[in-house]
Image (cartoon, helix red, strand yellow):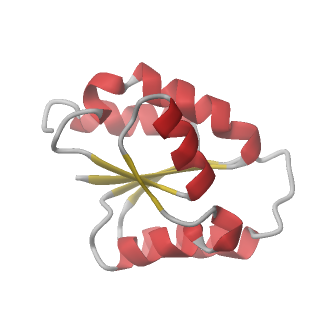
Amino acid sequence: MEIAIISHDGKKADMVQFLNKNKDVLSKESITLIATGTTGGRAEKAGFKVIKMLSGPLGGDAQIAARVAEGKTAMVFFFKDPLASHPHEPDVNMLVRVCDVHNVALATNEATAQLLLDAIATRV
């Protein structure tokens, strides 16, 4: 199962903390993590194997959306920072729309991401 991880700058530390908290599930051979560039780099430094796309503002969000549309990505964890403005907001909205169109689970905060992981933990 391919899971995409993305986080705005103000949420990168939260994403790494979430990944570490769920290391047993996310490190299983049946899970492949993909990420936008900077988030992926942070995840790698924390010891996770990650396939990195471009940085979000440089097209990484669009690359992940393409993988969702192709049926390759089964779940997206996008920790959004609701208190900051983001110049690439159209890309973010496009990714959310693609997840909705293709009925792919999308978590925009840790609470929802945890529920999704808990739901698949026994199946992976």
* Quarter of the rendering occupied by the C terminus: top left
Residue 101, image x, y percentages: 42, 77
Horizontal side, residue 104 vs residue 36: left or right: left
> Horizontal and vertical percent for residue 5?
48, 49
* Left/right of residue 57 with respect to residue 105 in the rendered view: right
Q: Nearer the viewer, residue 104 or 60?
A: 60
Q: Quadrant of residue 25?
A: top left
Question: From where the camera sits, is residue 78 visible?
Answer: no
Question: Does residue 83 appear to the left or right of 17 in the view shown?
Answer: right
Q: Position of residue 31 (x, y in %)?
A: 24, 45
Q: Is residue 102 above or below residue 74?
A: below
Question: What residue appears at the point 49 percent right and 74 percent down from the top-left corner?
Answer: 63
Residue 41 visible (yes or no): yes
Nearer the observer, 31 or 55: 55
Whether 33 is drawn above or below 36: the answer is above
| Residue occupying the point 57% across, 68% down | 61
Extreme top residue here? Answer: 21
Please state the horizontal and vertical placement of residue 55, each as a whole percent of the image: 63, 62
Q: Nearer the viewer, residue 102 or 69?
A: 69
**Residue 3 in the figure: left or right of residue 31:** right
| Position above or below: 107 against 104 | above
Identified at 39% across, 33% down, the residue is 115
Tell me which residue sits at (86%, 57%) in the image.
85
